[in-house]
Image: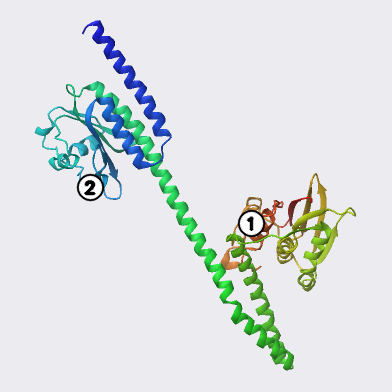
């Protein structure tokens, strides 16, 4: 080879290397699998100066290879062509995990004329390489009909590098697609759950209202044992109404239909208002509510009812998980440009590894079949949503089971 010929050859190699670098960048920034396949076949055709290229991927569910893309062909029609692992060129490359150069492809019994008809190329020369990723092969990359001369080892090396990049990019795109599908299923499940909560809380209110109405009527007119029975029905109905209210609040929170009406209020007054709504329940369990407030008023700008509901849920949680006769402390202090409020109980405590999970929907520390404390496990979820919707923050602190718990809330000062 003359000096001029060698220089041209070196320039050609340099251009191929630059094109491989460009391909790597493109593949790493493209996550749509259809786009990826087109980029890979187009680049392979250009690098090897051939008529076309095709990609065959391995189907793990139905062990076989199928055409995923080919130059100038309809992927849907290509996918219909069966490519067995035995007796086909692509199958041989895949099984042996080694490149294959055929510069007289038509004479090879493993060549499929059916493929030639679909890709609209009469295959004369063929180069195929496996597409490896880690310790497995995901498919085969083929180039057909070298325009000048025949395929050689350098062509095989270039196509192998292309195939290695392509395998990683395709695997990443598949993982992304799998993740997206999983997220879509989770979203659909969450929507079904939200719709059920809204529907159930709405539909159960009417019959529950009738039960409460008739029970009240019976309690007022009845005497003795019958009056006591009516009172028990009213108590149970009241508990059920509380559950429906929780379900309705959670459904409203998840539907993004909640409307906030901020008003300026002294934080200490707001906490006292929340405690008033829970005093009867605490009194029934002989539990004492105490305040730890400074004299200086802390003014916040919040939706009073919804913030009181959030603290009511926290207090309800403290009462339910504390022993009769115990003390529950409600306090607040100024913390920079925020108010830090807290509810501290002497209850069963929370395992350190569960301090985040207790705010998840329907989560309960107790196993569902051996529960002692009742509830749906959504009160804290609602409290978290209501506080965070107003720019606040909520968290729990506990040293573990048997050590009580403290729920803390940060809200911005007005």
Q: Position of residue 212 (x, y in %)?
A: 66, 83
Quadrant of residue 362 in the image? bottom right
Quadrant of residue 245 in the image? bottom right
How many marks are shown on the rendered structure?
A: 2
Q: Secondary structure at mark 1?
A: helix
Figure check: 104 above or below 303: above
Spatial CA distance of label 1 from label 2 is 51 Å
Query: Which residue is depicted at the point 30% across and 47% down?
Result: 60
**Relative to 100, is 21 on the left or the right?**
right
Q: Earlier in the sequence, mark 1 or mark 2?
A: 2
In what quadrant of the picture does the N terminus appear? top left
Quadrant of residue 341 in the image? bottom right
Q: Which residue is mark 2?
A: 77
Q: Position of residue 287 (x, y in %)?
A: 80, 67
User: 346 or 87, which lies in front?
Assistant: 87
Mark 1, other Cα within 10 Å: few <14 / some 14–19 / many ≥20: many
Q: Which residue is mark 1?
A: 359
């Amino acid at each position: 080879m003359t000096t001029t010929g060698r220089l041209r050859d070196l320039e050609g190699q340099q251009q191929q290397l630059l094109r491989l670098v460009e391909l790597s960048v493109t593949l790493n920034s493209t996550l749509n699998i259809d786009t990826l396949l087109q980029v890979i076949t187009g680049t392979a055709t250009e690098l090897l100066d051939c008529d076309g290229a095709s990609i065959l991927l391995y189907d793990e569910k139905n062990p076989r290879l199928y055409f995923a893309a080919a130059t100038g062909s309809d992927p849907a029609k290509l996918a219909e062509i069966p490519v067995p692992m035995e007796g086909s060129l692509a199958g041989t490359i895949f099984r042996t995990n080694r490149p294959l150069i055929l510069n007289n492809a038509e004479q090879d019994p493993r060549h499929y004329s059916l493929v030639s008809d679909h890709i609209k190329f009469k295959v004369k020369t063929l180069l195929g390489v496996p597409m490896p990723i880690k310790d497995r092969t995901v498919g085969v990359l083929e180039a057909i009909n070298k325009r000048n001369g025949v395929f050689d080892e350098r062509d095989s090396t270039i196509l192998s590098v292309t195939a290695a990049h392509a395998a990683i990019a395709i695997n990443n795109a598949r993982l992304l697609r799998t993740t997206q599908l999983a997220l879509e299923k989770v979203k659909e499940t969450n929507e079904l759950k939200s719709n059920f909560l809204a529907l159930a809380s709405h539909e159960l209110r009417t019959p529950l209202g009738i039960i409460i109405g008739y029970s009240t009527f019976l309690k007022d007119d009845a005497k003795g044992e019958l009056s006591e029975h009516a009172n028990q029905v009213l108590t149970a109905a009241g508990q059920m109404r509380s559950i429906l209210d929780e379900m309705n609040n959670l459904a409203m929170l998840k539907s993004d239909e909640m409307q906030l009406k901020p008003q300026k209020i002294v934080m200490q007054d707001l906490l006292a208002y929340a405690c008033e709504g829970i005093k009867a329940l605490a009194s029934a369990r002989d539990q004492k509510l105490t305040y730890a407030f400074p004299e200086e008023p802390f003014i916040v700008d919040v939706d009073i009812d919804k913030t009181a509901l959030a603290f009511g849920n926290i207090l309800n949680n403290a009462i339910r998980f504390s022993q009769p006769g115990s003390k529950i402390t409600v306090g607040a202090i100024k913390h920079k440009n925020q108010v830090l409020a807290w509810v501290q109980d002497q209850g069963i405590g929370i395992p350190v590894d569960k301090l985040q999970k207790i705010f998840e929907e329907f989560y309960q520390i107790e196993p569902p079949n051996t529960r002692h404390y009742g509830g749906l496990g959504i009160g804290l979820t609602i409290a978290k949503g209501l506080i965070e919707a107003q720019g606040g923050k909520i968290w729990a602190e506990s040293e573990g089971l048997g050590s009580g718990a403290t729920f803390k809330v940060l809200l911005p000062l007005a």
